[in-house]
Amino acid sequence: MSKIKQLKEARSKVFTQIDDLRKATDGRLMTAEEQAKWNELRAAYDVADRAVDAEEQFLDMERRQAQQAEERRNPAEGDAAERYGKAFLSYLRGGEAGLSAEERAALAPRNEVRAGTVGLTLTGQGNGVIVPETLESYVETALKSYGGMFEAATVFSTATGADLAVPTINDTTSKATIISEYSSTPTTTYTFGSKVMKAYTYRTPLVPVSYELLQDSAFSLETIFGDLMSVSFSRGANEHLTTGTGSNQPQGIVTAATDADVAAAATSIKSDDLYDLIESVDSNYARNGRFMLNRKTLFALAKLKDNDGRYLWQQSLAGDLPATIAGYGYVLNDDMPDIGAGKASVLFGELSKYRIRMVRSFSILRLNEALAANLAVGFFGFARLDGALIDAGTHPVKKLVHAASASE
């Protein structure tokens, strides 16, 4: 049995225990012992879930490594890749000024090929050096894994940071009709609009890396920089892409989403609230619909049943299919608001209608002098981006908003 299958089955066993406990306590309050068991199982499920995520990321990296090994069977390409890798490490350790003529020549062809294209770049004192594709893929995977917005949204890149007008059109009232022979074709007027996307610059904190670490080949520099930069960047960007105001920062998906037709109670959610939320979204968007919520809200929904007594949260016992809520997939995003008075704790709709605009891609800057007295080099990551929900007036994403007080 493969390791990923074992991990998924272990997660499923924990889920089964959670399911058994909530069935056993259905219709009454849990005892202190049962509540403690519930909390223990929730924590165990989180651990099992993270183990599955980590193994899936490893399998993805393993696949890329195998692909690179296949490509290197061509001796000429393999030699070039090896020369490039060594030159890149020299750049990290000594900067552009420390590169030999041979190393500059090894770096030049790939820079020429990829200059101006979508890709992860590392910028130094001069023209900048493209990092290996393994680090690019590592950071891309980390961005999708952290927070949720890079997983749910449609991400695209532009070559410059100039304001970008994304056109919208509303033709929901237009439909074909039967026209008799030789009769004129009727005309209609479409409603055109646009959403202007900007390019806000996000920077990670400056990270010191000692020369000793840079010189020690036993460490994987790609993994180090992938971990240090991508998580820090995602932590800041994901918050604004979720709840940003749109004033001098991206407008988050929660801010941009439209209120559902019915509000939930101030401090709780009923199963009918979720069905009302689904019903409020146009069928064209609902067929591709997914929920977005944080982990605390997910476990609050774990006890909810539909009108036939079936739990809304369903996990495949085989562990091969993703879990669902009321038959729809979901994205976990811990920057989503908790359940609470006046808050919007759950989104539903075609989440991919939210667009994240990146200028080129995530980049890393090497500072040679900032920490020289400590025998260290400073690195920080940055990217320019904006986010917007592309809504032509048909509201592809709705939010479940809780009443402002218990009396409402």
Image: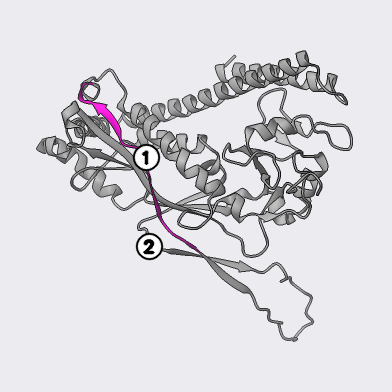
Please report contact status of discs 1 and 2: CB closer than 8 Å, yes or no.
Answer: no
In the drawing, does residue 171 fall left or right of residue 71?
A: right
Q: Can residue 76 be seen at all in this image of the molecule?
A: no
Mark number, residue 24: none
Residue 318 sits inside the magenta stretch: no
Residue 86 vertical placement versus 257 (above, below): above
Residue pointed to by mark 2 = 162
Residue 175: image x %, image y %? Answer: 73, 70
Q: Quadrant of residue 12?
A: top right
Q: Taking the image as drawn, is residue 126 in sight?
A: yes
Which residue is painted at 52% across and 53% down in the image?
Answer: 355
Task: Examine the image and state in which quarter residue 285 appears.
Answer: bottom right
Q: Secondary structure at mark 2?
A: loop
Q: Which residues are magenta?
A: 196-212
Dot 1: element: loop
Q: Nearer the viewer, mark 1 or mark 2?
A: 1
Where does residue 242 sit, x and y in percent of width and height?
56, 46
Q: CA distance from mark 1 to mark 2?
A: 22 Å
Residue drawn where x is 73% and y is 46% of the image: 402
- Residues 31 and 363: in front is 31
Q: Amino acid at mark 2?
A: Ala
Q: Quadrant of residue 77?
A: top left
As drawn, is 129 to the left or to the right of 290? left
Quarter that holds the N terminus: top right
Label 1 sits on residue: 204
